[in-house]
Amino acid sequence: MGKDMKRKLFEISEKLIIYTDGGSRGNPGEAAIGVVLGSNRYGERIGIKTNNQAEYLALIFALKKAKQLIGKKTAKKSNLEVRMDSELVVRQLSGRYKIEEPDLQTLFIEAWNLRLDFESVAFTHIPRLENVLADSLVNDALDGSGKRSGRLV
Protein backbone atom coordinates (compact mmCIF):
# COMPACT_ATOMS: atom_id res chain seq x y z
CA MET A 1 0.00 0.00 0.00
CA GLY A 2 1.31 3.40 -0.89
CA LYS A 3 1.80 6.36 1.41
CA ASP A 4 -1.14 8.15 -0.23
CA MET A 5 -3.60 5.48 1.01
CA LYS A 6 -2.15 5.56 4.52
CA ARG A 7 -2.35 9.36 4.54
CA LYS A 8 -5.95 9.22 3.30
CA LEU A 9 -6.98 6.90 6.15
CA PHE A 10 -5.42 9.20 8.74
CA GLU A 11 -6.12 12.61 7.17
CA ILE A 12 -8.70 13.80 9.74
CA SER A 13 -6.62 13.10 12.85
CA GLU A 14 -3.72 11.11 14.20
CA LYS A 15 -6.20 8.42 15.13
CA LEU A 16 -7.95 6.15 12.65
CA ILE A 17 -11.70 6.29 13.28
CA ILE A 18 -13.68 3.21 12.24
CA TYR A 19 -17.45 2.79 12.30
CA THR A 20 -18.91 -0.71 12.48
CA ASP A 21 -22.38 -2.18 12.55
CA GLY A 22 -23.84 -5.63 12.35
CA GLY A 23 -27.42 -6.71 12.14
CA SER A 24 -29.70 -9.63 11.53
CA ARG A 25 -33.22 -9.85 10.26
CA GLY A 26 -34.61 -12.25 12.79
CA ASN A 27 -32.54 -13.17 15.80
CA PRO A 28 -30.97 -15.36 14.59
CA GLY A 29 -31.60 -14.61 10.94
CA GLU A 30 -29.93 -13.51 7.73
CA ALA A 31 -27.18 -11.15 8.86
CA ALA A 32 -24.69 -8.65 7.46
CA ILE A 33 -21.91 -6.33 8.54
CA GLY A 34 -21.10 -2.74 7.61
CA VAL A 35 -17.73 -1.06 8.11
CA VAL A 36 -16.58 2.49 7.39
CA LEU A 37 -12.80 2.64 7.54
CA GLY A 38 -11.52 6.03 6.49
CA SER A 39 -12.82 6.59 2.97
CA ASN A 40 -13.47 2.87 2.44
CA ARG A 41 -16.91 1.28 2.80
CA TYR A 42 -17.58 -2.41 3.19
CA GLY A 43 -20.83 -4.34 3.37
CA GLU A 44 -21.13 -8.09 3.41
CA ARG A 45 -23.69 -10.79 4.13
CA ILE A 46 -22.47 -13.25 6.74
CA GLY A 47 -25.17 -15.92 6.78
CA ILE A 48 -27.47 -16.81 9.66
CA LYS A 49 -26.29 -15.10 12.85
CA THR A 50 -27.66 -13.33 15.88
CA ASN A 51 -27.50 -9.55 16.04
CA ASN A 52 -24.74 -9.70 18.67
CA GLN A 53 -22.68 -12.14 16.60
CA ALA A 54 -23.02 -9.79 13.62
CA GLU A 55 -21.82 -6.83 15.73
CA TYR A 56 -18.69 -8.76 16.78
CA LEU A 57 -18.04 -10.00 13.24
CA ALA A 58 -18.20 -6.41 11.95
CA LEU A 59 -15.59 -5.41 14.52
CA ILE A 60 -13.35 -8.37 13.66
CA PHE A 61 -13.62 -7.61 9.94
CA ALA A 62 -12.74 -3.94 10.61
CA LEU A 63 -9.65 -4.72 12.67
CA LYS A 64 -8.36 -7.21 10.10
CA LYS A 65 -9.05 -4.82 7.22
CA ALA A 66 -7.36 -1.90 9.01
CA LYS A 67 -4.21 -3.94 9.52
CA GLN A 68 -4.29 -5.08 5.90
CA LEU A 69 -4.73 -1.53 4.57
CA ILE A 70 -2.10 0.20 6.68
CA GLY A 71 0.36 -2.67 6.98
CA LYS A 72 1.74 -4.54 9.97
CA LYS A 73 4.49 -2.02 10.83
CA THR A 74 2.21 1.01 10.67
CA ALA A 75 -0.51 -0.86 12.60
CA LYS A 76 1.82 -1.41 15.56
CA LYS A 77 2.21 2.39 15.85
CA SER A 78 -1.44 3.24 15.14
CA ASN A 79 -4.20 4.39 17.46
CA LEU A 80 -7.69 3.33 16.47
CA GLU A 81 -11.10 4.30 17.71
CA VAL A 82 -13.89 1.92 16.80
CA ARG A 83 -17.31 3.53 17.07
CA MET A 84 -20.34 1.27 17.19
CA ASP A 85 -23.93 1.41 18.34
CA SER A 86 -23.75 -1.93 20.17
CA GLU A 87 -23.65 -1.06 23.85
CA LEU A 88 -23.30 -4.76 24.67
CA VAL A 89 -20.13 -5.25 22.62
CA VAL A 90 -18.52 -2.04 23.88
CA ARG A 91 -19.27 -2.90 27.50
CA GLN A 92 -18.05 -6.48 27.10
CA LEU A 93 -14.79 -5.25 25.55
CA SER A 94 -14.33 -2.75 28.38
CA GLY A 95 -14.91 -5.42 31.03
CA ARG A 96 -18.14 -3.94 32.35
CA TYR A 97 -20.35 -6.80 31.13
CA LYS A 98 -19.69 -10.52 31.43
CA ILE A 99 -19.82 -12.66 28.32
CA GLU A 100 -22.15 -15.54 29.06
CA GLU A 101 -22.93 -16.84 25.56
CA PRO A 102 -20.27 -19.33 24.34
CA ASP A 103 -20.56 -18.06 20.73
CA LEU A 104 -19.82 -14.52 21.87
CA GLN A 105 -16.93 -15.65 24.08
CA THR A 106 -15.13 -17.02 21.01
CA LEU A 107 -15.75 -13.82 19.04
CA PHE A 108 -14.70 -11.68 22.01
CA ILE A 109 -11.37 -13.52 22.24
CA GLU A 110 -10.74 -13.06 18.52
CA ALA A 111 -11.52 -9.32 18.70
CA TRP A 112 -9.46 -8.92 21.88
CA ASN A 113 -6.44 -10.60 20.27
CA LEU A 114 -6.73 -8.54 17.07
CA ARG A 115 -6.54 -5.30 19.04
CA LEU A 116 -3.02 -6.32 20.09
CA ASP A 117 -1.89 -5.68 16.49
CA PHE A 118 -2.23 -1.92 17.13
CA GLU A 119 -0.68 0.63 19.51
CA SER A 120 -4.13 1.17 21.00
CA VAL A 121 -7.77 0.50 20.20
CA ALA A 122 -10.57 2.37 21.93
CA PHE A 123 -14.13 1.07 21.68
CA THR A 124 -16.77 3.81 21.80
CA HIS A 125 -20.53 3.40 22.03
CA ILE A 126 -22.36 5.91 19.85
CA PRO A 127 -26.05 6.51 19.24
CA ARG A 128 -27.53 4.75 16.23
CA LEU A 129 -28.08 8.12 14.55
CA GLU A 130 -24.30 8.67 14.50
CA ASN A 131 -23.76 5.29 12.83
CA VAL A 132 -26.06 5.78 9.86
CA LEU A 133 -23.47 5.03 7.16
CA ALA A 134 -22.35 1.69 8.63
CA ASP A 135 -26.00 0.80 9.26
CA SER A 136 -26.90 1.58 5.64
CA LEU A 137 -24.10 -0.75 4.46
CA VAL A 138 -25.65 -3.56 6.54
CA ASN A 139 -29.08 -2.91 5.05
CA ASP A 140 -27.73 -2.61 1.50
CA ALA A 141 -26.01 -5.99 1.87
CA LEU A 142 -29.17 -7.58 3.27
CA ASP A 143 -31.34 -6.01 0.56
CA GLY A 144 -28.99 -7.23 -2.14
CA SER A 145 -28.13 -3.72 -3.37
CA GLY A 146 -24.63 -3.78 -1.87
CA LYS A 147 -21.77 -6.09 -2.72
CA ARG A 148 -21.69 -9.27 -0.70
CA SER A 149 -18.02 -10.04 -1.03
CA GLY A 150 -16.72 -7.65 1.59
CA ARG A 151 -15.24 -5.36 -1.04
CA LEU A 152 -15.78 -1.68 -1.42
CA VAL A 153 -19.50 -0.89 -1.63
Image (cartoon, rainbow, N blue to C red):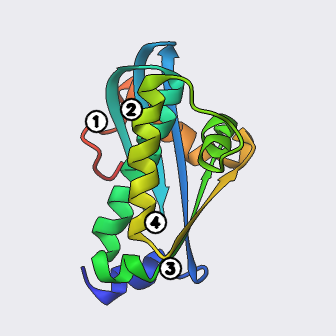
- In the rendered structure, the answer to whether residue 63 lies left or right of residue 98 reads left
Instruction: Please tell me which residue lies in front, 132 or 91.
Output: 91
Looking at the rendered structure, the secondary structure element under dot 4 is: loop
Looking at the rendered structure, the secondary structure element under dot 2 is: helix
What kind of residue is marked 2? Ala
Query: Between marks 4 and 2, how big is the CA–CA gap?
Result: 18 Å
Query: Between marks 1 and 3, how big is the CA–CA gap?
Result: 26 Å
- Rendered residue at 48%/67% (across/down): 38
Instruction: Please tell me which residue lies in front, 104 or 67.
Output: 104
- Rendered residue at 28%/50% (across/down): 151
User: Does the residue at mark 2 contact the one at mark 1 (Cβ under 8 Å)?
Assistant: yes
Q: Is residue 56 visible?
A: yes
- In the rendered structure, the answer to whether residue 66 lies left or right of residue 27 reads left
For mark 1, what is the residue? 148
The numbered mark, 2 or 1, whose residue comes first in the sequence reads: 2
The numbered mark, 1 or 3, whose residue comes first in the sequence reads: 3
Q: For residue 31, which quarter of the picture?
A: top left
In percent of width and height, residue 69 lies at: 31, 69
Category of crowding for the residue at label 3, using alpha-carbon neighbours closer than 10 angstroms: few (below 14), some (14–19), many (at least 20): some
The numbered mark, 4 or 2, whose residue comes first in the sequence reads: 4
Query: Between marks 1 and 4, how big is the CA–CA gap?
Result: 19 Å
In percent of width and height, residue 149 lies at: 24, 40
Category of crowding for the residue at label 2, using alpha-carbon neighbours closer than 10 angstroms: few (below 14), some (14–19), many (at least 20): many
For mark 3, what is the residue? 10
What kind of residue is marked 3? Phe
Category of crowding for the residue at label 4, using alpha-carbon neighbours closer than 10 angstroms: few (below 14), some (14–19), many (at least 20): few
What kind of residue is marked 4? Ser
Looking at the rendered structure, the secondary structure element under dot 1 is: loop
Q: Work out which quarter of the rendered image holds the N terminus and state it.
A: bottom left
The numbered mark, 2 or 3, whose residue comes first in the sequence reads: 3
User: Does the residue at mark 4 contact the one at mark 2 (Cβ under 8 Å)?
Assistant: no
Disc assigned to residue 141: 2
